[in-house]
Amino acid sequence: IAEDFIDADIVSLRWRHKLNSRLGLDSQLSYERANFEGSSGSRLDEAESAAVGVEFHFTRWLMMDTRVEYRDRQSNIGQYDYQRALFH
């Protein structure tokens, strides 16, 4: 029986600020360290990310938001390294 597992530690800091009744800002910083152990060997990843976003409330129940996030992952196995900017 193969025992595969991920041991991960994640630290995240998030700040949200309401500018007025309709407009808000959101930002987040994160750090992750993940240790993958299993039948195919082991892998250690470290990832850092930063994100900022804006949200607009049309009504109490309808809102729209947009966010940009930058993520940098470094691994002891090169094929898992990446840097990426995400827009959503």
Image: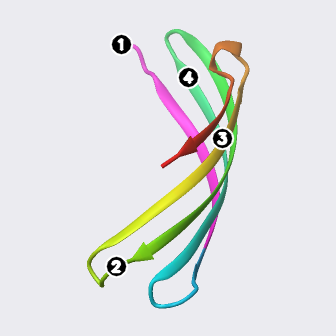
- Residue 65 found in image quarter: bottom left
Secondary element at image label 3: strand
Q: Label 2: which residue?
A: 58
How far apart in space, not on screen, are marks 1 and 4 (Cα)?
Answer: 14 Å
Q: Secondary structure at mark 1?
A: loop
Q: Are marks 4 and 3 in contact (CB under 8 Å)?
A: no
Callout 3: few (<14), some (14-19), or many (20+) C-alpha neighbours within 10 Å?
some
Nearest to N terminus: mark 4 or mark 3: 4
Eye-nearest disc, 2 or 1: 2
Q: Quote the CA–CA distance across marks 4 and 3.
A: 23 Å
Instruction: Specify which label sits upstream in the sequence, 3 or 2.
Output: 2
Q: Which residue position is annotated with label 1? A: 1
- Tell me which amino acid carries mark 1: Ile
Q: Label 4, on which residue?
A: 37
Which residue does the image show at 52% across and 90% down from the upper left?
Answer: 20
| Quadrant in the picture for residue 16 | bottom right
First to last magenta residue range? 1-15
Q: Nearer the viewer, residue 78 or 63?
A: 63
19 on left or right of 31: left
Where does label 3 land, which residue?
A: 71
Quarter of the figure with the N terminus: top left
